[in-house]
Structures are given as structure tokens and as C-alpha cells.
Image: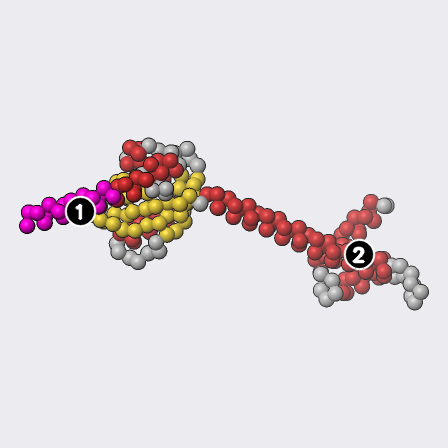
Amino acid sequence: MIAVKTDLCGVLLLGAEYFKYIFDYSPLPIYIFQDATFRMVNHKMVQITGYSGDELLSINFLELIYSEDRQLVADHISRRLAGESMKEDYAFRAINKHGNIIHVRGYFSVIDFEGCPAVLGQLLNISEQRSIEAALRKSKKELAEKVDYLNALIRILSIADAYDAMTSDRPYRQAMTHLEAVSELTRCSGTQFDPHLVAVFLDMLEETERKHI
């Protein structure tokens, strides 16, 4: 019985050492969170936060979470520790020692740490991905605005072309007066032409006439 117990202790000790080795040398920031504080952090957590290991162990975990995401993270932690089935990963924003925002995706699981439930967390820095996504959204918005502008310009030019045709002599009819052409454009507004763009064109026409008075 004593030999079996000794062997079991040896296995447990080897398991603990293996876990610590994986924990310390993981390429990702890893931590164990319990009772609102970090219980263990690896060197990658030190790198991503800018705090020393000792500083992290004395900080309230939620102080490192961006204020707008703090409630989200707190709710996930409490519900996970309460035994609810939660998604294993989600994205949130953290703050490093210098006050810079870091976009991270966290991967979480509940473990037993020194006889009590704790959260084992791993973080993936997705700040660069978020920057690229933001740049793409901005580019798409700018492109959409340019396309909308060009489409509006083309439709205004079609209104201008119609006005020019109506106020020019043709072999089959005399030119309309300015007021007659305006009346015709107004009549076709909402059917053949965009009402807003007709109004824009007429304003532009009126402004041009004022400049030539």
C-alpha cells in the first residue's frame, strides 16, 4: 500500500511539473484566475500586458479589461464558474500597462486549482487582425461613397441632358422656354427622374443663372 501511494504521488508530481512546463513555455499568454485575482501567469502574459509577474499577481484581473468590455468579461467568468455551459472563446479588449488597447480572443476552461474552481485562460492577440478589418471597412465605405457619388453624378447629367434637349431647337419642334423645361422636369420628377436630384439640378441651374446676371 505504501509503495502504491508513493508511485501515485510520483505520477501527480510529474503531472504538475509537466503542466508547469507547458504553462511557462506556451507561445500564448496563459493565466489562472481565481477570486478576482491572477494566481499564475506565464512570461507571455508579462509581455502582452507590460506588467511584471509580481505586479500581475497583485492586480484585480478586471482592471486589465477595457471599461466597455468589463461587464461582459465579468459575466462570462461568474457564469462559467457557476457551471453554466458557455462558449469556450470570445473576443474582448484589454488594456496594457501603458494604457494601450489590445484586442484579444480568449479561450477559457474551468479547472481545479488548490482545491477550488478557477479559470484557465489563454489569450490570442488579434489587434493586427482588427486593424486590418477596420481598414477594410473604411475602404469599403469610401468606395461605396464614391460609387454613390458617381451614380448621382450620372443621373444629374442625364437630367442636364434632358434639359438641354428640351431648350434646344430640333427639326421637328421649337425649343422650350426655361420655365417650360423646368415644368417638364418637375412633372417627370419621381417617375423618370429622381426628385432629389431634380431639385439639386434646378438649384445648380438657378445658381448659375444668378452668377451670369
Residue beneath the point at 38% across and 35% down: 47
Residue 5, given in percent of the width and then of the height, sits at 10, 48
Residue 126, given in percent of the width and then of the height, sits at 44, 45
Residue beneath the point at 91% across and 66% down: 173
Say if the magenta span includes residue 36.
no
Mark 1, secondary structure of its residue: helix
Relative side of 66 to 79, left or right: right
Q: Are marks 1 and 2 in contact (CB under 8 Å)?
A: no
Highlighted magenta segment, given as a residue range: 1-18
The residue under label 2 is 160
Say if the magenta span includes residue 11.
yes
Mark 2, secondary structure of its residue: helix
In front here: 196 or 100?
100
Residue 9, given in percent of the width and then of the height, sits at 14, 45
Q: Is residue 60 visible?
A: no
Q: Residues within 10 Å of mark 2 (few under 14, many from 20)?
A: some
Quadrant position of residue 10: top left
The residue under label 1 is 11
